[in-house]
Amino acid sequence: MDELAGKRALVVGGSRGFGRGIAEGLLAAGAAVHVVARHPEPLADLERASEGRIRTTAGDAGDPAVRARLLDEAGHDIVILNAGAPPQLAPIHDQSWESFSINWNSDVKIVFHWLREILLAPLPSGSQVVVMSSGAALRGSPLSGGYAGAKATVRFMAQYAAEESSRAKLGIRIASVLPRLTPATELGRPAVAAYARRAGRSEEQFLAQMGPPLTPPLVGAALVRLLTDRLLDAHAAFALDHGGLTPLD
């Protein structure tokens, strides 16, 4: 597969889970991949096996200096914004405002600043930006504090940025992806367990009701399709489950 041969991708938050699946998918499609994460050590094996096509930077995606330095690097054709914080799992009456607002102060803030810089820099015409939101933005997430609302805002910010790119004729395509809850990631596993308990079911029963799980490799393959299938260019947001991408607009 060489759909992205010659492309340079920056994955923000790509060391594990969906982020790692995306980095591996881009690499398999021929892209050179740069991953920034607080703890990129889990990618050491992939870095060694890639013969120089993947490199990592340890850094906080919310740090303005890190953001500025990475966006100043010439030649990024693709930027994937996947960084965020795990929500505190508890019903609303057991949340504090600090725990409830975790994802507003991390996920929303990170995406806001990155999209703002991407439009002001700007990235070169023809670049593509994908913002990872969550299926919780469509259905709510009563055990995750402000997570669902934060992820809905992330989706809207991607839409707003896409509209501004179009208005300014920047030629930067910006889209959001809303993946379904899955037990296949460190973020999803405790959430599945919490919702199973809330429903009075075993995890096995709960998962059987959910259907086939979304996995990091499936997310990576879906992102490659989004970046290469020009029939999808007309859409700004996509739900994602085991069956693939579904346009939401």
Image: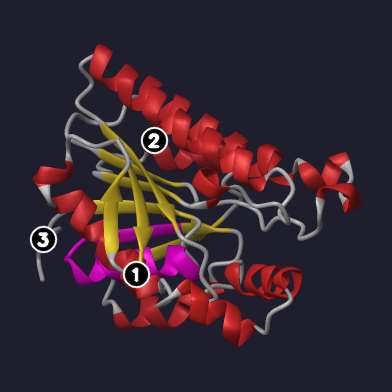
Res 72 label = 2
Disc 2/disc 1 C-alpha distance (Å): 36 Å
Instruction: Write the residue at 26% across / 12% down.
Output: 167
Please name which of the two marks, 1 or 3, marks the residue nearer to the observer: 1
Sort mark 3 into few (<14), some (14-19) or many (20+) by Cα contacts within 10 Å.
some
* For marks 2 and 1 on the same chain, the one whose residue lies earlier in the sequence: 2
For the record, the magenta segment spans: 16-35
* For marks 1 and 3 on the same chain, the one whose residue lies earlier in the sequence: 3
Q: Amino acid at mark 1?
A: His
Disc 3/disc 2 C-alpha distance (Å): 25 Å
Residue 189, position as x, y percentages in the image:
62, 75
Please name which of the two marks, 2 or 1, marks the residue nearer to the observer: 1
Quadrant (top left/top right/bottom left/bottom right) for the C terminus: top left
Q: Mark 1 — residue? A: 242
Q: Is 157 part of what is drawn in magenta?
A: no
Sort mark 1 into few (<14), some (14-19) or many (20+) by Cα contacts within 10 Å.
some
Disc 1/disc 3 C-alpha distance (Å): 22 Å
Question: Which of the two residues, 107 or 26, is positioned nearer the viewer here?
Answer: 107
Do the numbered discs 3 and 2 sit on residues whose CB atoms are within 8 Å?
A: no
Sort mark 2 into few (<14), some (14-19) or many (20+) by Cα contacts within 10 Å.
few
Residue 72, position as x, y percentages in the image:
39, 35
Residue 102, position as x, y percentages in the image:
74, 45
Left or right relative to 149: residue 162: left
Quadrant (top left/top right/bottom left/bottom right) for the N terminus: bottom left
